[in-house]
Amino acid sequence: MFVVATAGHVDHGKSTLVKALTGMEPDRWEEERRRGLTIDLGFAWTTLPSGREVAFVDVPGHERFLSNMLAGVGPAPIVCFVIAADKGWQAQSSDHRDAITALGIDRGLVVITRADLAPDTIAVTEAQVRTQLQGTPLAAAPIVAVSATTGEGMDDLVARLDEVTAAAPAPDPVARVRLWLDRAFSITGAGTVATGTLTAGTLQVGQRMEIVGATTSARTGIRGMQSRESSAEVVTPAARVAVNLRDVSADDIHRGDALITPDAWPIVTVVDVRRTMGEPLDDGVHELMLHIGTAAVPVRLRPFDADHARLTLDRPLPLELGDRVVLRNPGSRNVFAGVVVLDVDPPELGRRGDGVRRAAELAERPVTGDVLAEVARRGAVERAVLARFGVVAAGSASSTDASGSVDATLPAGVEALAGRLVHTPALEAWVQAARETVSRQLAAQPMAAGVPVKVVIEALRRTDPPLPDGGGALVATIIGRAGLETADGMVRPPGHTADLGPAEAGVAALERRLAADPFDAPEADDLRALRLGARELAVAEKAGRVLRLGDGVVVSPRTPAQAMRLLAGLAQPFTTSQARQALGTTRRVVIPLLEHLDGRGWTRRLDGSHREVVR
């Protein structure tokens, strides 16, 4: 299906044209039919001779209903611009042209209606249209003159519709969904139904979705769907679709709400934009209405210069880079300006001159998003985050990720590491900071076995840019790039051993004593005489030079294995006393030593007085 929205001045025959094309009455309200005036959006559809299906969104042309008109045209990829031959180009024609231009809709056709009422003016009207559309996306749109009453030119119009739809680019059926809703109602026995124009992505019955709205934000599910008044299990773009939703009331859904793929969109209230048409953004207007899709949201504008500004929205919307937005002055029925979204996660601005600097930065930014700029600002960012923003990773240079594979989509200066995109200069700064932190800490504490990982992370978070949260894998990569290693929660240079300093002589004397008799563990007085306190013994143990058992008993790391060789020669099971005699030591030493052997699973305690060697 192809979705086409009408546009044009009030009473130029848009609804009559849609009815002639489809055989369906697009005006849904009794008041609309009684007054002959379209007030709200109307919907109708037909099948072209080619077999392509076309759904029409008929919009009001009266200036009082410009907001409704924008809600109809906003999600539509194709427009049918209507001018009456007997009236020519009029004020609201210009407003609708400006809205279409601001939204960047570049597919469509122009229909000169009522050709039977003013056949002599058709050429003049066509010339008016060409002049008025010059420089707009519809400048080259085909023009067809018709009479919906007599049928004149209708066959030609249908043929042109076939050509326009055939030339339209295919929408992406695997894209994330953002369905701007235009109606919501309740059906007895079915529940809540919401309708909209699906321009990308695919909807399926049973699919979990999320509603982002003016009064509610909630998870929901698709109970059922209809398109062209027929039930459907799957709906692909582009299409008009009615979605039966679970777990949400129709009273909580309003025009301008969006049904989106969960966790796939940034839900934002602040964006930075560039003017594409209309009035300069720095002309003193600060309170405006933002129109996108079917949404109309009050915004506050902070201009950076004539072409760039920051918009703060009254409520959150799912937006992405490249979104085209219409800005309208609430006190006027005209389009104030069209803008394109450049940043959905803009930086805070608090210093003098930040606005000027931001304008210069935005002036250089491509509409598709600058991967290098986005990554550089953060130092490191997950790919999924940039995907939600709508940033397109494109560049001529390549980068190598941690696995060694090449990613040719990344620009120079960006690397794929540990599941993130990392700015190379930031990575180099973090590597240097890790190296300096470890060196400085070990110089200050030579007896330390290393520097706690937490200390290194805290140092990395003080750099510019700081290391982002949640980067455990990235921290490990940084440590490796710095030529360091991690063991037991400590970061250290490879082969690092604690410098015992003045305690070295005492540890060496203790090693000699235990080498002569591995079970002759020193008493507390002996350790004091060797100037070995708890700190010195802990460092020596980390270095693998002593082993501390319970009750202050210190032995050689080889003592347990030496004990096992002697205990294995005893009749099994054996008593504590028999073990003491075999080892030639005291109960002070043998009891914590046996408990250590039990803990390693080398011996097994059978009862209060017997053990055996585990074979």
Image (spheres, grey):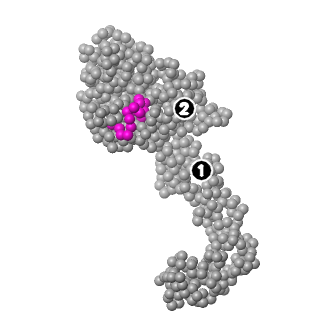
The amino acid marked with disc number 1 is Leu
Residue 564, located in which quarter of the rendered image?
A: bottom right
Q: Position of residue 64 (x, y in %)?
A: 43, 17
**Residue at image coords 47%, 83%:** 615
Task: Let me know if residue 300 is in the magenta part.
Answer: no
Secondary element at tag 1: loop
Q: Relative to 262, is 404 above or below?
A: below
Check residue 251 for magenta coloring. yes
Using the rendered image of the protein, determine whether residue 72 is visible from the camera's viewpoint.
yes
Residue 12 appears in view: no
Percent of width and height locating residue 435: 64, 58
Q: Is the residue under label 2 in contact with that under label 1 (CB below 8 Å)?
A: no
Highlighted magenta segment, given as a residue range? 243-258
In the depicted structure, whether residue 46 falls above or below residue 264: above
Q: Quadrant of residue 62?
A: top left
Position of 499 with respect to 3 (left or right) is: right
User: Which residue occupies 30% across, 39% down?
Assistant: 224
Lateral position of residue 260 relative to residue 591, left or right? left
Q: Residue at x 34, y 14 (%)?
A: 35
Residue 37 percent location from the top left of the image: 35, 16
Q: Which quarter of the figure has residue 455?
A: bottom right
Residue annotated with mark 2: 312
In this figure, which residue is indicated by the disc labeled 1? 467
Q: Which mark is residue 514?
A: none
Residue at 61 percent across and 59 percent down: it is: 453
Q: Is residue 362 or residue 76 the one in the foreground?
A: 76
- Nearer the camera: disc 1 or disc 2: 2
- Of residues 525 and 501, the one nearer the viewer is 525
- Dot 1 alpha-carbon crowd within 10 angstroms: few under 14, some 14 to 19, many 20 or more: many
Decide: is 509 above or below 113: below
Secondary element type, mark 2: strand
